[in-house]
Image (tube, rainbow, N blue to C red):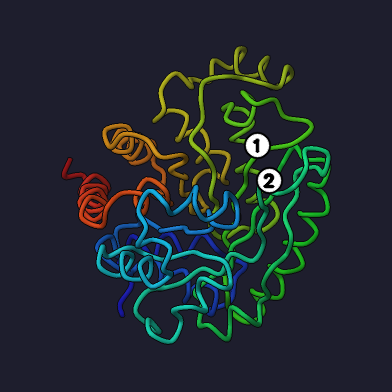
Amino acid sequence: MKASRTVQKILANYEGENPGVKGNLCRMLMEGRLGGTGKMIILPVDQGFEHGPARSFAPNPPAYDPHYHYQIAIDAGLNAYAAPLGMLEAGADTFAGQIPTILKANSANSLMSDTAGKNQAVTASVDDALRLGCAAIGFTIYPGSDAQLDMYEEIVEMRAEAASVGIPTVIWSYPRGEAVTKDGETAIDVAAYAAQIAALIGAHVIKIKLSTDHLMLPEAKKVYQERKIDVSTQAKRVAHCMDAAFGGRRIVVFSGGAAKGSDAVYEDARAIRDGGGNGSIIGRNTFQRSRADAMAMLGKLVDIYKGRD
């Protein structure tokens, strides 16, 4: 597999990494219908852990089967498929080598009490990722949670172990918890801060949410106003988050969020593309639809990222 010039330029930004890490990043960037473009679409299926099985899969019952998700990612020509340990193990042999996989190494669940704080349990290891032939590990942090410092220390240690054996790290950086208001979870100043934190603790790929033009932090708000930082459109907010990710030197993909209309999904993708983002990591908006509708949506998203729509 020869890396395109675009992918070579992206890999050159990872100056401190070994050939194994870069090789696996290249493997994902060169995979599927967007291979070589520098854009990515990743299918994440950790919602059964986060929200429960019925909330996640009852809208499209075939999605209860882990093989269904492997096959969708392969048939749609996606760059990678991300899931917790059990989901990957359930299809690892059948689909070995057919799609790069990302082992989601920590998870939360909806059975926690409101007083427990926002945190996630480590549920898989680097050894698991090696055993399953994964192209990366994934890990969620919650900037704004009282537990955030522990989460940073956990992923810094796991990232170092993974990098030592050539496995890159994808960090889900989701502001949430005691120091963040509900509106603040998607505020642009907080989203950019989340991207910066993930980059600073060593993420090779950063996953954040699309943001609103709300500004939560008073001191940051002063700077946005004084410097006239334009965050008036989604594309401009994406561009600002790319600036926060080391001036675009880190791969940033944006989550699809809760299920919504197809037109909204496509508008989000156009904004990500126009703002210089690297792509989408989209779960419920595809696997909660029928297979035919999901395939059509993913095909259109590929066209959007290729500039055809």
Residue 193: mark in rendering = 1
Residue drawn at 57 percent across, 49 percent down: 51
Looking at the image, do the residues carrying marks 1 and 2 touch, with CB atoms under 8 Å apart?
A: yes
Left or right, 192 with respect to 301, comes to right
Q: Residue at x 51, y 70 (%)?
A: 87
Element at label 2: helix
Residue 40 seen in this snapshot: no
Name the residue located 72 percent from the left edge and 29 percent from the top edge. Answer: 180
Query: Is 207 located above or below residue 99 in the figure?
Result: above
Residue 202 location, quadrant: bottom right
Q: Position of residue 140 (x, y in %)?
A: 65, 54
Disc 2 residue type?
Ile
Give the answer, above or below, for where 81 lies relative to 305: below
Looking at the image, is 146 positioned above or below residue 131?
Answer: above
Residue 240 seen in the figure? yes
Q: Distance between the Cα atoms at labels 1 and 2?
A: 6 Å
**x then y, percent, for residue 90:** 48, 78
Relative depth, front residue between 265 and 24: 265
Helix, strand or loop at mark 1: helix
Q: Quadrant of the N terminus?
A: bottom left
Q: Residue at x 44, y 18 (%)?
A: 232
- Residue nearest the viewer, comparing 8 with 34: 34
Dot 1 crowding, Cα within 10 Å, few <14, some 14–19, many 20+: some
Q: Quadrant of the C terminus?
A: top left
* Towards the viewer: 123 or 206: 123
Q: Residues within 10 Å of mark 2 (few under 14, many from 20)?
A: many
Residue 135 in the image: x percent, y percent? 49, 74
Question: Which residue is the site of mark 2?
Answer: 197
Task: Report the amino acid beneath label 1.
Answer: Tyr
Query: Residue extending furthest left?
Result: 308
- x then y, percent, for residue 44: 46, 58
Is 193 or 210 nearer to us in this picture?
210
